[in-house]
Image: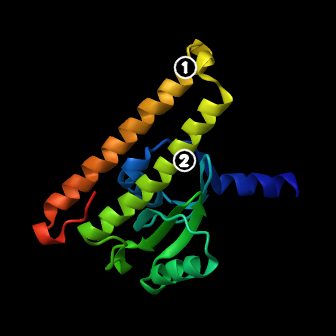
Amino acid sequence: MPKKDQNALKANARKMSKIFMPWNFEKEQTWLEEQAREGWLLERKSFNYHFIKSEPQEMVYRVDYYSITDKKKKEEYMTIFEESGWEFVHGSSGWNYFRIPTDQFDVDIYSDPQSRIEQLKRISQDIFGIFIIYFITFTVIYNFERWFDLIYFIPMLTFLIFGLIYILKIQNKIKALNAMLDEEDQVPE
């Protein structure tokens, strides 16, 4: 590709690093909406956010977590969003990014507390599973005698603390949403 074309592509693309905790995906959505207002639309998400240049737009972004391996269920999941007018932007490791122009936004992805609770429970269950697998793997690979070496203990302690914080944050969100529901409609934690 000629250098002129490469420079044109670079001028129309931007890569940004930003960290959002799994329990704060609302902040991530708001940030993506701000980028769209500045004329940068999300193209894909990996370790970095990849944007393409566009006209400044008012967009609504939603980040959903739904890890689906069954192809038919994945197609049904995508169809539900497409029929509601949502554009699928990118999916990675169970995290799915959708957007819709603000003037077409009338049906939210999770419009009631019960569906939000179910979403949070999916996130929590999958991350907790990963947490357990990591813990068991770490325990098997590094026997208990080596745990007390700082080089092994500090990463494990950090991971345990992060896991605990994560679980508490998700549980607090679920409790807050359950408080919005009538007693008979509450979802067990």
Q: Is residue 137 left or right of residue 162?
A: right
- Secondary structure beneath disc 1? helix
Q: Which residue is pictured at 25% across the width and 47% down the height? A: 172
The quarter holding residue 151 reads top right
In this view of the protein, can residue 182 be seen by the observer?
no
The quarter holding residue 45 reads bottom right
Q: How far apart are marks 2 and 1 (CA)?
A: 19 Å
Q: What residue is shown with label 2? A: 130
Q: Is label 2 in contact with label 1 (beta carbons under 8 Å)?
A: no
Amino acid type, label 2: Ile
Where in the figure is residue 69, as x and y percent of width and height?
Answer: 61, 69
Q: Viewer-proximal residue, 91 or 188? A: 188
Q: Which residue is pictured at 37% across the width and 48% down the height? A: 24
The crowd level at tag 2 (other Cα within 10 Å; few <14, some 14-19, many 20+) is few
- Secondary structure beneath disc 2? helix
Amino acid type, label 1: Phe
Identify the disc placed on residue 153: 1
Q: Which residue is pictured at 33% across the width and 73% down the height? A: 108
Q: Which quadrant does the C terminus fall into?
A: bottom left
In this view of the protein, can residue 174 be seen by the observer?
yes
With respect to residue 78, does 142 lie above or below?
above
